[in-house]
Amino acid sequence: MTPLLLGFLGLPAVLILIFLRVPIGIAMLAIGVFGSWAVTGSFNPVSAQFKNLAYSTYASYSLSVVPLFLLMGQFATLGGLSAGLFNAAAAWLGHKKGGVAMAAIGASAGFGAICGSSLATAATMGQVALPELKKYGYSGALSTGAVAAGGTLGILIPPSIILVIFAVLTEQNIAKLFMGAFIPGILAAIGYIVVIAIYVRVQPEAGGVRERMPYGQRFRELAKTWPVLVVFLAVIGGIYAGIFTPTEAAAVGAAGTFLIALAARSLDRKTIVEACLATASATAMIFLIVLGAAALNGFLAMSQVPQVMASWVGEQGFNPWVVMVLVLVFYLVMGCVMDSLSMILLTVPIIFPMMSVLDFGLTPDEFGIWFGIIVLIVVEVGLITPPVGMNLFIINSMSPQTRLSETYRGVLPFVASDIVRTAILVAFPPITLWLVWMLY
């Protein structure tokens, strides 16, 4: 069996192991090790490669951003920032038809600006928003669908852990990727709010209204969100002002949210230990997957699969836009059965070199940023796509009176909004790149 054929068999072998419930990191690590052995015919070069693999993988300075952003999200949750954001958004929008659900979207967008995890954003906002949505008579389908969709803003609005991983895999600039995600993130939030407005007009019984608040109280609720603004400006503003590197900014953000939680008197020895343990657990899970991906990528490099695929696509003269559509459809299908991080780590090392040889009228740096944001958006759709959208399970478990089928039905209009937005951003790359062009 040729090395190339072994390489092409590697991806389906990983998928089979995943479907057999082998953890994704271990599945990729196993195929990487045994695939490399099959290509070389000996364990000696494989053992020589893998004895330093963990160190060389984790020594990447960029990866230190991951635990810091996770810790920042933990402290932000403990500091009650999610509740403050929701209360402020509800004060301004709650009296409108569907307004409390719109407030959940707005609060999720704000929380996503200080938390780089979609699952954490969904879980945190679910605790705050679902009781209020139930209180004001919102249907289970709209309530769970809106909160699950809002949770995806956690990885789209910077900072984003998935973008950090993509940057490490493709050697892109993290700060430029963060900036490229801003406008798509805002469009996502607006699109979800429009979906809710249409939803409650088509099904008036699905959403209630909250009493109108006086403007004085609205401004008081808005003023309570100043810690979020301070942390966001310190982290993102510090990066673009050249004051901090992304890693230093993440450290500043973690320290800032720690002080906010401390001032809110929501920290004690127990909660600090729990926050650190939750961060360590999530980081260990992510890093195991990263290590497995590094092993698998080593095997694929030996078998020449990425290089052969890139050369073949370049030689065939395919229309670049047709190839892009096929890749995005592939991601949408994969998103129905896999989590976002696994998809990125498993597919980007093969697909990115293949797409890089096609001519989209962009420079290599521009293409890397644009393609990274497009992939992030499609991966985000996977988080709310039945049957295995992770956000759907998290939110549904927090609303036991809502059947999972209702949650599936309620989230479909938001998936449609995501698909429309993806089509717009694919057709018009300057929408994604405009802020990058302005600042760099």
Image (spheres, rainbow, N blue to C red):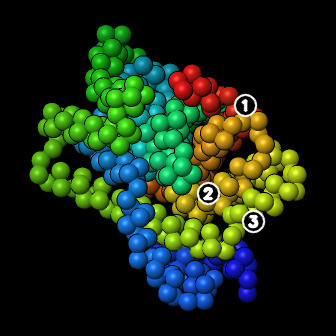
Find disc 2 in the rendering and name its residue: 348
Residue at 50% from the left image edge and 21% from the top image edge: 96
Amino acid at circle 2:
Val
Q: What kind of residue is marked 1?
A: Phe
Residue lying at the far bottom of the rendered structure: 42
Residue at the (46%, 82%) spot, across then down: 47
Task: Check the picture and name the quadrant holding the C terminus.
Answer: top right
Q: Which residue is mark 1?
A: 428
Identify the mark nearer the N-term, 3 or 2.
3
Viewed as shown, does residue 417 lie left or right of 93?
A: right
Residue 217 position within the rendered picture, expressed as x and y whole percent measured from the top left: 30, 14
The residue that disc 3 covers is: 308
**Mark 3 touches mark 1? (CB < 8 Å):** no
User: Given this view, does label 2 or label 1 mark the residue nearer the observer?
Assistant: 2
What is the quadrant of the N terminus in the image? bottom right
| Residue in front for this viewpoint, 382 or 298 | 298
